[in-house]
Image (cartoon, rainbow, N blue to C red):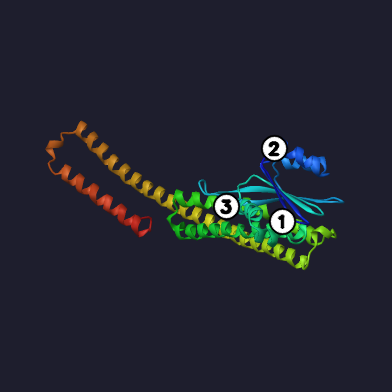
Amino acid sequence: MSLKIIHTKNLKWIDIVQPNDQDLVYLKEHFPFHPLDYEDVMTPSTRPKIDAYDSYHFIILLFPFLNKNKEEIQPVEVDFFVGPDYMVTIHNGAMKTLTNLVHNVSQYDNVRNQYMSSSPGYLLFSVLELLFKRSFPILDHINRSLDQAGREIFEADFKTLKRLSTLKKNIIIYRRIMKMHKFVLSKLMHSKQLYLQFQFSKNYFQNLIEYAENIWDVLASDKETTESYEQTNQSLAAHRMNDILRTLTIFSVVIFILTLFVNVMLFAETVTRIDEYPYLLPLTITSLLLITLGMLTYFKHKKWL
């Protein structure tokens, strides 16, 4: 059973990593949670939610996790049950910030007193604050990648296009993760339940809302920048392709003219005795060169080259 219980005089924190059937049995024996909440716990969620009951709150939040091997952002779910004298957290263990916090609170008295000396609402706020703060380095990583893409944009190669596509995908995922956070935090801030309230609780939860808004604003700006870079890259790639096609067309025309003259020479050889005209071959070659040079000069004058 991957379950850890941390006690203080007035508060209990139960942390469960990758819950199994034994964990659910323990929760059912000790807490009156709604059956639908257990279904939500065992089923991956695609969006945040908050359910307020008479004696507890059930909260699902998603947070960004950067898979450094794939350079992809993935949503990580954290479930919270918050009641009069307890808080239950359920997650998959991917976020080291949360697992390290649980370890430190369980091992060190001073850390435990810092986080668990007040109400369950303050413990919830403290955990959420850490999880929001850990999201900012991921946002910084996106911005650094965006700056790198901006410097490489004029290369208009496949590497830059792939980088922009990955950035756009990560920003979309991040925005989807953050979209409902403000709603959930507002519900917590305005809740009348005593176990969610503590000194200056409204101000503290308002700070979390501002975190969420700041992240959303930065992501909106990054989205616009990425789309602008993508359009510029596509325009440059199209212009480069046009240059290639134009060059190939010019060479095709030149080769066609040369081929035509060679065919004329071959035809002349079959109907006449070409050796009777010793100046015909040099004259033909000179004509071909002059025509080629004339065509290239004309193309350059038209700025096709």
Residue under circle 2? 20
Looking at the rendered structure, the kind of residue marked 2 is Asn
Label whose residue precedes the other's in the sequence (2 or 3): 2
Looking at the rendered structure, the kind of residue marked 3 is Lys
Q: CA distance from mark 2 to mark 1?
A: 27 Å
Residue 293 in the image: state x and y as whole percent: 27, 53
Q: Residue at x 47, y 57 (%)?
A: 153
Residue 181 image label: 1
Q: CA distance from mark 2 to mark 3?
A: 36 Å
Q: Dot 3: what SS?
A: helix
Q: Are marks 1 and 3 in contact (CB under 8 Å)?
A: no
Q: CA distance from mark 1 to mark 3?
A: 21 Å
Question: On screen, 18 above or below 180?
Answer: above
Determine whether, in the image, residue 60 is placed left or right of residue 54: left
Q: Nearer the viewer, residue 236 or 248?
A: 236
Q: Residue at x 73, y 65 (%)?
A: 204
Q: Residue at x 37, y 49 (%)?
A: 247
Question: On screen, 70 above or below 274?
Answer: below
Label whose residue precedes the other's in the sequence (2 or 1): 2
Looking at the rendered structure, the kind of residue marked 1 is His
Q: What crowding class fits label 3: few (fewer than 14 Cα within 10 Å), some (14-19), or many (20 or more)?
A: many
Q: Classify the position of the C terminus by image quarter.
A: bottom left
Q: Dot 1: what SS?
A: helix
Residue under circle 3? 168
Report the mark closest to the observer, 2 or 3: 2
Report the mark closest to the observer, 1 or 3: 1
Report the mark closest to the observer, 2 or 1: 2
Determine whether, in the image, residue 94 is placed left or right of residue 28: left
